[in-house]
Amino acid sequence: MKRAYNFNAGPAALPLAVLEKANAEWLNIFGSGMSVMELSHRSKEYEQIHAKAQNLLRELMNIPEHYEVLFLQGGASLQFSMVPMNLLPKDQVAYYVLTGAWSDKALKEAKKVGKTKVAASSKEDNYTYIPPIEEIQLGEDAAYLHITSNNTIYGTQWKVFPTSSTVPIVADMSSDILSKKIDVSSFGLIYAGAQKNLGPSGVTVVIIRKDLINNSLSELPTMLNYETHAKNNSLYNTPPTMAIYLLSLVLEWVKEQGGVEAIEKINEQKAKVLYKMIDESEGFYKGHALPDSRSHMNVTFTLPNEELTKKFLSQAKEEGFVGLSGHRSIGGCRASIYNAVPLEHCERLAEFMETFRIKNNLLLKK
């Protein structure tokens, strides 16, 4: 079969090598005579998968020993609630930087739990940029500072992260985790839904500094307490075993590519190909994000009018390009170029964009 040029925002493309390996082991993993979906999560076979995923993530991200690596469920959306439930005392305030729809939703959930303040925002400019670090305002009452590292809908991404020696930085990295090197020790907590760079939907990775796990939160529902999952190695209840298995294969693939550093270089190349096309299109394509805030994961752009946008998406689909529609809140187009999207697919998309521009620019001028 011919594989699609998959630019979906999430669930997103998985590496072909990962899918092929999973296919080969589908009916008989480790000689067990069972699929991974049939294994007991208490079995030695599954324990091997679980440990492999944790260890590879620690290795690839250089996660210090004083951090827990948890595999949870509920997506990043559940973390919007779990973070303040676990980290926001009644006498303190959670500060949020608003850079898009997901940070806005995270703030909305935190407001239900305790006191919050907006530390900085680009909302008034339709989230076209990441606020400068020097604009972030934190009070002495800060329990934590929350950011969203990459914004899938608007196509913006933090290039440099805020730091603090006293206030934990909490980051939703759902759409760019493992896409570039970061210093994990600069953060108190990192969380990410897997369905963009780490694997399929169904598992959420949480990387949390051990001193932030509060063992006195007995009033919290058991499943919403980080301590529950840390004490039980993310095995308090049945974990999403299939998703964690595929996560382990994706991490193995990243290591085989040369690790995060090599992946980052390829991601820079992919983004450069598409942004170059946009910038040199003489205004035919216009990027939503300001140049210094552009995402290397989600390239958002518009065409001269709605009629051309529909035509572009229709012809792109005929050529095998999938997932290029912009989010309904801002329209236009979006190419999500996560780790598993090959450079060749971005080059093919750029070629299509150029051909479409040349043909339709002539029609616009008539």
Image: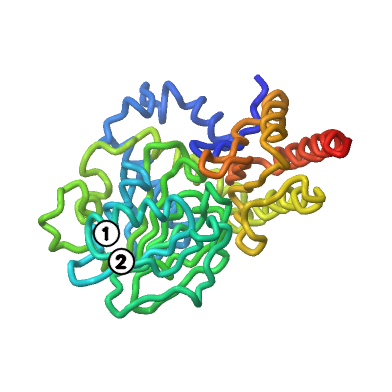
Q: Quadrant of the N terminus?
A: top right
Residue type pointed to by label 2 = Ala
Indicate the secondary structure of the residue bearing disc 1. helix
Q: Is residue 14 above or below residue 280?
A: above
Q: Is residue 138 above or below residue 219?
A: below
Q: Quadrant of residue 132?
A: bottom right
> Circle 1 sits on which residue?
84
Q: CA distance from mark 1 to mark 2?
A: 7 Å
**x, y (%) of residue 261?**
60, 58
Q: Name, please, the residue furthest toward the front.
A: 366
**x, y (%) of residue 300?**
62, 47
Left or right of 345: which side holds 154?
left
Q: Say few, some or many: other residues with alpha carbon within 10 Å of mark 1 (under 14 / 14 to 19 / 20 or more).
A: many
Front residue (pair 296, 67): 296
Front residue (pair 2, 326): 326
Q: Earlier in the sequence, mark 1 or mark 2?
A: 1
Which mark, by number, is residue 94?
2
Residue type pointed to by label 1 = Pro
Q: How is the image coloured?
A: rainbow
Contact? badges 1 and 2 (CB < 8 Å): yes
